[in-house]
Image: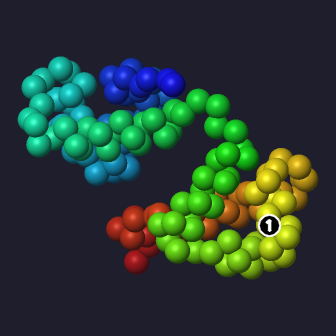
Amino acid sequence: MKTYDLKELLDKAYSDGFTEKSIAIATGVSIELIDRYYNGTNIEQSEIQELGYLLDFLMEVYREDVAQDEYIRGIVQTLNYFFQISNKTIANYLDISMEEFEKLLQNPCEKVEYYRYSLKILHLFMSFVRDRKYSYD
């Protein structure tokens, strides 16, 4: 099992050009807390959970070996579990049969058109997880 170091993940994010502000927006962790942790300043016990959110986020961003098939299945499972969207609804959204949807989940890279379906699944996911405060009024 791979272990992750939050400081190393922050180093990687910063070297890739992510800013503290973009990370704070995505995680809900304050820039001030990110700075204090990164610079080795003492962290309060009550702030540990927030750093856990930060670690979870960066682990997801930099998770190694993100194979498209596992990634798409994971997104579908998230849509099923957290948003109560059935596979049938997703298949309808993709305008494909349940049989074709099951084939897509088994091997998203099997057919060229599955790439388009995978992008639509990503779009659906992003539409559901988007924070309304970043939407247009």
Residue 47, image x, y percentages: 15, 41
For image coordinates 67% across by 78% down, the residue present is 89
Considering only vertical position in the picture, is 101 above or below 27? below
* Quadrant into which the C terminus falls: bottom left
Considering only vertical position in the picture, is 63 above or below 132? above
In this view, the residue in front, 72 or 124, is: 72
Does residue 116 appear in this view? no
Count of number-bearing discs: 1
Q: Left or right? Give the position of 37 relative to 130.
A: left
Q: Left or right? Give the position of 45 relative to 135.
A: left
Say which element carries label 1: helix
Q: State the colouring used for the structure image.
A: rainbow
Residue 39, image x, y percentages: 20, 21
Q: On the image, which quarter does residue 45 sit in? A: top left
Q: On the image, which quarter does residue 3 sit in? A: top left
Residue 91, image x, y percentages: 75, 73
Q: Left or right? Give the position of 27 relative to 100.
A: left
- Name the residue that disc number 1 marks: 101
For image coordinates 35% across by 68% down, the residue present is 133
Does residue 98 appear in this view? yes
Q: Specify the farthest residue to the front.
A: 1
For image coordinates 50% across by 39% down, the residue present is 61
Q: Specify the farthest residue to the right.
A: 111
Q: How crowded is the residue under tag 1: few (<14 C-alpha within 10 Å), some, or many (20+)?
A: many
Residue 104, image x, y percentages: 81, 59
In this view, the residue in front, 81 or 55, is: 81
For image coordinates 26% across by 38% down, the residue present is 51
Considering only vertical position in the picture, is 95 above or below 12? below
Kind of residue at disc 1:
Phe
Considering only vertical position in the picture, is 97 above or below 71? below
